[in-house]
Image (spheres, grey):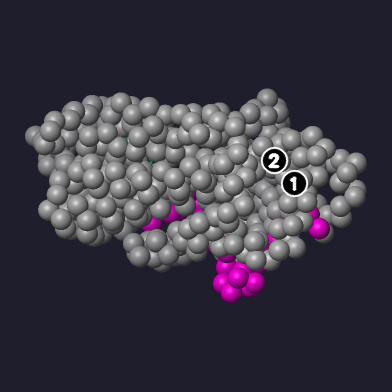
Amino acid sequence: MTQAFDVVVVGAGMVGAALATGLGRDGLNVAMVDRAPAPDFDPAAAPDIRVSALSAGSERYLRTLGAWPHILDMRATPYQRLAVWDETRHPLATLIPRTLTEVEFDAAALGASHLGHIVENSVTQQALWQTAGAESLVTVIAGQSVSTLEQTRQTVTLTLQNGQALEAKLVIGADGAQSRIRDLAGIGVARNQYNQQAMVISVRYQGPVENVTWQGFHPTGPRAFLPLHSAGPDHPGESWGSLVWYDAPEELARLKALPSEQLMAEIRKAFPSELPSLTHIDACASFPIARQHARHYFAGRVVLAGDSAHTINPLAGQGVNLGFQDAQCLQAMVKEARRAGDDLADPTWLGKYEQQRRPANRRMMMTMDLFYHLFSNRIPPVHLLRNLGLGAARALPFARNRVARYAMGIDEELPVIVKQLAARLPGIDQL
Ligand SMILES: Cc1cc2nc3c(=O)[nH]c(=O)nc-3n(C[C@H](O)[C@H](O)[C@H](O)COP(=O)(O)OP(=O)(O)OC[C@H]3O[C@@H](n4cnc5c(N)ncnc54)[C@H](O)[C@@H]3O)c2cc1C
């Protein structure tokens, strides 16, 4: 039997579950489908290997959806400071003292209580499944992936793995970077694989929960520290943290194959001296990183949001923050279409969604590329330039605060100088 809905959201990761909650709350009849079973949370378990820095803007959005209190009931770690510096060893580096080339953003200087929170992806997803499940108009279908998609002038029909058919006016593909919905709708992507991969390592360290997240840029890629919650009474005096080590795939494969003690020794050797004293490695996993942008955000009655529409280099941790901005914009457009009495897949409204989100997502991609090219480079003038750039950012509190406000999700626009630099990168016009 075919079940009819206004909207079917395929993929109930952080972005899809947020959209299902918001649309259900706006009075739409929604099905939320995910191939994975419902996520669960065990307070005694080690942290999820995948964590995200959620900006103040994302926090605001998650509050409006009612998910934020659920997140705080599980676990989230606020950070007040964010530091970035260049770790390249080069003769010219001695000309510029480290204190001049380190940029630190401080919540207090921006009049804020914190810059953001580090939250495990499974915690955010679990909170959003709770809010979606609490909406009477949202039907949650877990453990089913989509087999077929067929569009007519009036509707779109999906068949699930178990043969169940779902009919809707609009299908939202929020099924991640390898989106099947994007493929079934015939939407192509422009993709650029970086030479680096990201290895994420869950660790425990000695000491109270840190209030800073930092990243040192090495020519082979950045090395970053993200603080997590206290390790509790089982490990008194210890806290959890997440390390991210960007490097060539072969080097990360070598590191991943090492026994825990040897990997710990390599981390101590390679990471900046700011790294707290590590006591245990719980898990590590590596992720390929690519810049990917869908050629179109919609085709007929299918529209994309989050990683299915775009992935960026995670070095500044902005992927899901952008996805949440897509979700808010798309929800607003669907609401407007409905208020106007238009078809929910009316190209005028879906076109407005793409017009708003594509340039913003593209701008963030370009900015990440600018950082990637600038810092993965040993050429002396480039080294000098980036250090002068960091020095200038440090010396110009106004510019620095503008970047921080953008990263926090308070401002929507990057400073003009960053936009201009990013626009000069090769290959950007093909995005
Ligand atoms: C190393 C690393 C670090 C990162 N750090 C940050 C950070 O600090 N801050 C940040 O903002 N972002 C970060 N990101 C990016 C962030 O993880 C992604 O942008 C985010 O997970 C995208 O969410 P999503 O909901 O769009 O997609 P996903 O999280 O990929 O969710 C997709 C969902 O769709 C489901 N699905 C897939 N296919 C199907 C199908 N055929 N049928 C049904 N369901 C399906 C999956 O089960 C999943 O639940 C990082 C990424 C990486 C790799």
Residue 301 shows in this picture: yes
Q: Residue at x 62, y 45 (%)?
A: 421
Q: Residue at x 44, y 45 (%)?
A: 359
Q: Is residue 185 left or right of residue 326?
A: left
Residue assigned mark 1: 386
The location of residue 147, given as percent across then percent down, is 26, 27
Mark 1 residue CB less than 8 A from any atom of ligand 1: no
Determine the quadrant in which ligand 1 lies. Answer: top left
Q: Residue at x 59, y 32 (%)?
A: 426
Answer with mark 2 or mark 1, whichever residue precedes in sequence.
2
Depth order, front residue of 389/52: 389
Under tag 1, what secondary structure?
A: helix
Residue assigned mark 2: 374
Mark 2 residue CB less than 8 A from any atom of ligand 1: no
Q: Which residues are magenta?
A: 100-127
Depth order, front residue of 82/228: 82
- Residue 57 within the magenta-colored segment of the rendering: no
Q: Quadrant of residue 154?
A: top left
Mark 2–mark 1 contact, CB under 8 Å? yes
Kindly give the residue lying farthest to the left in the view shown: 1
The location of residue 376, given as percent across then percent down, is 71, 36
When the figure is inspected, residue 353 is found, relative to residue 177, above or below; the finding is: below
Q: Quadrant of the N terminus?
A: top left
- Residue 107 within the magenta-colored segment of the rendering: yes
The location of residue 53, given as percent across then percent down, is 54, 54
Under tag 2, what secondary structure?
A: helix
